[in-house]
Image: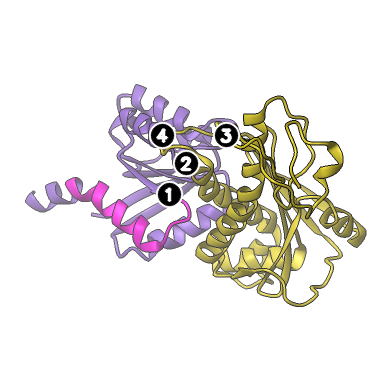
Chain colours: A yellow, B purple
Amino acid sequence: MRGTFPPQADLFAEGKEVVFEHEQEHLWEIQKGATRQKVESEQKYYLEIIMLETSENILQESLAEALETMAFMMAMPPEDELPVPEQGTMVWMDFNGRVSGRVELLAGVEFIEMAAANIMGADPDDELVQSKGVDAFKEILNTSCGVLLPRLADSPKDVFDVTVPESEDFSDPQQWTDYTNQDGVTVLDVDGFPLALRMTITS
Amino acid sequence: MSYNILIVDDSCAMRTVIKRTVGMAELPIGEIYEAGSGKEGLEVLREQWVDLVLADINMPEMTGIEMTERMQADEEMRNVPVIVVSTEASTTRIEQLKGQGVRGYVHKPFTPEQIRDEIIRVLAPAVELESRE
């Protein structure tokens, strides 16, 4: 399907393939997973769509690297259905630079305690793990962003300002389901534990 | 001689990791002090003898950058070497840190070998001087 800029709103449906627009060919395309956005110019539209397509993969790779190095855990796309956590925590942090946005991670308490135990070299039942599990989860997020942001940069000189990670607990499995059903959320299997992640680009 | 080390990071988990890694570095380590912010770090530095600081940058209350600036402004603290252990990757920022007197840098996530090698590199002049004496 071809069209001229700006694309019609109904063509933002996920999975719908259209031809991409740029200056020379006057064609346009929506990558799978792109979300509807108000666009101001042809070039900005092109940039935003490309960013949405690649940033999701970059986030997954960055998280996988952080988990493997810090917690000795492997993050993979799930092959089987994973259990829905009954309680857990969401952590998030914002970044501001050439690209600005937010990264969110959501996990159940079982994953958080296991990851914290691995990071701190302790047993999951250890008092330190029990009390500092969310702290360790925030550090996983922080480290993931440390891997992620250079990959979003144009140059090694690019500077990003980041916020201190924040957290909020959840105690109802429905909250997990509601979150993971949102656009842009990916769920990974980390050694049998579900871990949800999302990056939102704001500018 | 053994070296007293101060670890400054708002994450208790990360302080535990660094402490464990330092312990595995096969260096003559004396006391290991911990602080959760740049402000707490300065308090430790005022009260204790510290030979090396391992500090994060992005912390609440006082950042690692602010702490380093205060250290440079203090006659006694400015001689204490600082290694930044951070997720910061911008070469612009890292050069700024070195311009402010930071002697070393380790990027998170790090391996035990990376942090050990950087500690050895930064402390090497002190160790060399000691061996001559």
Whether labels 1 and 4 belong to a single chain: the reply is: no
Q: Secondary structure at mark 4?
A: loop
The residue labelled by disc 2 is B88
- Image x and y of residue A181, in percent: 85, 56
- Residue linked to disc 4: A157
Which chain is disc 4 placed on?
A
Viewed as shown, does residue B80 lie left or right of B62? left
> Which tag is nearer the camera, tag 1 or tag 4?
4
**Marks 3 and 2: which is nearer the front?**
3
Magenta stretch: dominant secondary structure: helix
Mark 3 lies on residue: A24
Is there any visible trace of residue A46 in the rendered image?
A: yes
Identify the secondary structure beneath mark 3. loop
Are there few (<14), some (14-19), or many (20+) residues within 10 Å of tag 4?
some
| Residue where numbered disc 1 is placed | B107
Image coordinates for residue A156, horizontal then vertical, percent = 41, 39
The chain ID associated with circle 2 is: B
> Depth-wise, is mark 4 or mark 3 nearer the camera?
3
Is residue B13 shown above or below B105?
Answer: below
Q: Nearer the viewer, residue A113 or A131?
A: A113
Residue B128 relative to residue A63: left or right? left
Q: Quadrant of the C terminus of chain A?
A: top right
Query: Which chain does tag 1 point to?
Result: B
State which tag comes first along the sequence, 4 or 3.
Answer: 3
Distance (Cα) linking label 1 and label 4: 15 Å
What distance separates the C-alpha of mark 3 from that of mark 2? Answer: 39 Å
Mark 1 belongs to which amino acid? His
Q: Is residue A101 visible?
A: no
Amino acid type for the residue under numbered disc 3: Gln
Q: Residue furthest bottom?
A: A80
Q: Where does the image place residue A109, in percent across and percent down from the top left?
A: 76, 63
Going by the numbered disc 4, the residue's amino acid type is Lys
